Image (spheres, grey):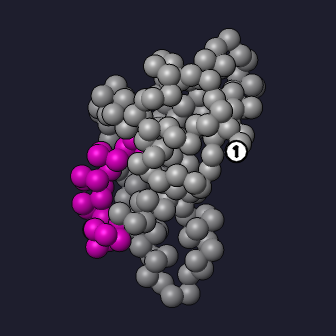
Amino acid sequence: MGNELNIKDYFNKNIRDKEWQNNKQKFQTYFRSMLKLLKFALTDEEFSCDVVEKVMYRLLFGYNGIGKHGITTKLKTTNTIGLPSDKVTSDHVFGAIEIGKFVRTEFESNNYDIDYMVDFWLYENLYLWCKIKVTKEEHKKDNIERNKHTINEKMNLLHYKNVSDIVF
């Protein structure tokens, strides 16, 4: 498979529908709650921008936006094969903070329409929470670049600079 994979296409073809079928209510309940918190934060003048960026993006959306700490894709780097669990980690392909930033942008561009975001947008963008298993060494910032790529670039794993081939 190598690193020429489009993660969104792979996820939507192989993972999304089963995850949605098994977790739809949970995903929608959590996502709705997080959107309500974000809307409050964005419309309350006394709410700290620092809290939005450091807490809400990363924790509320990146890690907990759908009620689970990401979605396993069954993808892994070849260097993880045979390693004990303490030598590997699951990488959030799109980055926890970037997920939050993207959700905010989409939320604002859809006029803070929570129902639309929950009922339609979430299913189409569920891939944002996907994870790939990498070694702890591969997970370092020099190997998987952070904050340098757009969501579209990350779909093609362009930020995976120094990792072994990605396999199923």
Pick the residue in front: 87 or 51. Answer: 87
* Dot 1: element: loop
**Magenta-colored stretch includes residue 124:** yes
For the point 54% across and 31% down, the residue is 132
Place of residue 109 in the rendered image (x, y in percent of width and height, measured from the top left): 31, 69
Place of residue 15 in the rendered image (x, y in percent of width and height, measured from the top left): 36, 29
Does residue 79 sit above or below 73 in this rendering?
A: above
The residue singled out by tag 1 in the image is 141
Name the residue at the bottom extreme: 45
- Total tally of numbered discs in the picture: 1
Place of residue 164 in the rendered image (x, y in percent of width and height, measured from the top left): 62, 23
Magenta stretch, residue numbers: 107-128
For the point 56% across and 70% down, the residue is 52
Q: Is residue 66 visible?
A: no
Q: Give, as a three-letter code, the residue at label 1.
A: Lys
Give the quadrant of residue 133.
top right
